[in-house]
């Protein structure tokens, strides 16, 4: 049985978020919470989209159903936290991080290859979210938020392993791992230019 500490080690991320990002996030709580809430909603929408586009894949549909429900529960949790603190959910902001990841792989007419690429991108988004939540929780004096993000990062790690595991079932493991390796390298360069905004992936 893989424990949480092992999952964090297994994320494979090649760039560590500096604690300076956590300071920026702490100083702009409403903005970071709004961004986080909409990221959960987008994650739920992505899971539903995978169900719609690959409805014949029974295992995928079952896994994405669970993830879609859980992500919307997270959205509700973040929103409730905001309301309790007298905050109002702001407007959705463009997530250029996800857009850039989605553009990394060349387009393909092969349905299976397209699915694998979508799963890998989703896995990486979950992995980076998990890492960011870890940095945020470890640099947070607010005990409620510290606990809140520590609990959420465990869910993100589980989602990461689900997406990556599914990708490896739909294509040869070596081929998938090569794609994963190249995507991780690309993302590490992308992250070197970030860390200046109060956004989960900013």
Image (spheres, grey):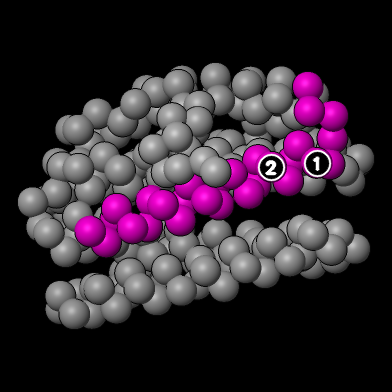
Left of 30 or right of it: where is 171? right
Expressed as whole percent of the image width and height from the top left, the position of residue 55 reads: 85, 65
Q: Nearer the viewer, residue 81 or 10?
A: 10
Was residue 150 drawn as part of the magenta stretch in this picture?
yes
Left of 67 or right of it: where is 11? left
Place residue 91 in its image quadrant: bottom left
Location of the C terminus (image quadrant): top left
Q: Can residue 126 be seen in this view?
A: no
Location of the N terminus (image quadrant): top right
Q: Give the range drawn in magenta.
A: 147-174
The dot on residue 169 is: 1
Taking the spot 52% from the left edge, 69% from the top edge, the residue there is 70
Q: Distance between the residues labelled 2 and 1?
A: 7 Å
Determine the secondary structure under disc 1: helix
Was residue 169 drawn as part of the magenta stretch in this picture?
yes
Tell me which secondary structure the magenta stretch mostly adopts: helix
Expressed as whole percent of the image width and height from the top left, the position of residue 81 reads: 25, 73
Taking the spot 38% from the left edge, 51% from the top edge, the residue there is 153
**Within-10-Å neighbours for mark 1: few <14, some 14–19, many 20+:** few
Q: Are marks 2 and 1 in contact (CB under 8 Å)?
A: yes
Left of 31 or right of it: where is 164? right
Expressed as whole percent of the image width and height from the top left, the position of residue 126 reads: 50, 46
Taking the spot 22% from the left edge, 37% from the top edge, the residue there is 21
Q: In this view, does 106 lie above or below 174?
A: below
Residue lying farthest to the left in this orientation: 141
The dot on residue 165 is: 2
């Amino acid at each position: 049985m893989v424990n949480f500490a092992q999952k964090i080690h297994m994320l494979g991320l090649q760039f560590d978020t500096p604690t300076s990002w956590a300071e920026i996030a702490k100083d702009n709580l409403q903005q970071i919470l709004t961004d986080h809430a909409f990221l959960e909603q987008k994650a739920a929408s992505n899971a539903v989209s995978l169900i719609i586009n690959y409805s014949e894949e029974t295992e995928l549909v079952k896994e994405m159903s669970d993830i879609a429900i859980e992500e919307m529960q997270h959205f509700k949790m973040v929103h409730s936290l905001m309301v309790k603190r007298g905050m109002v959910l702001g407007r959705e902001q463009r997530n250029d991080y996800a857009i850039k990841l989605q553009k990394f792989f060349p387009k393909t007419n092969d349905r299976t290859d397209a699915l694998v690429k979508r799963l890998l991108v989703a896995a990486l988004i979950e992995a980076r979210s998990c890492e960011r939540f870890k940095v945020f929780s470890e640099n947070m004096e607010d005990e409620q938020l510290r606990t809140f993000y520590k609990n959420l990062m465990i869910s993100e790690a589980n989602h990461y392993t689900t997406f990556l595991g599914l990708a490896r079932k739909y294509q040869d493991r070596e081929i998938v791992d090569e794609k994963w390796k190249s995507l991780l390298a690309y993302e590490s360069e992308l992250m070197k230019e970030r860390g200046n905004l109060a956004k989960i992936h900013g």
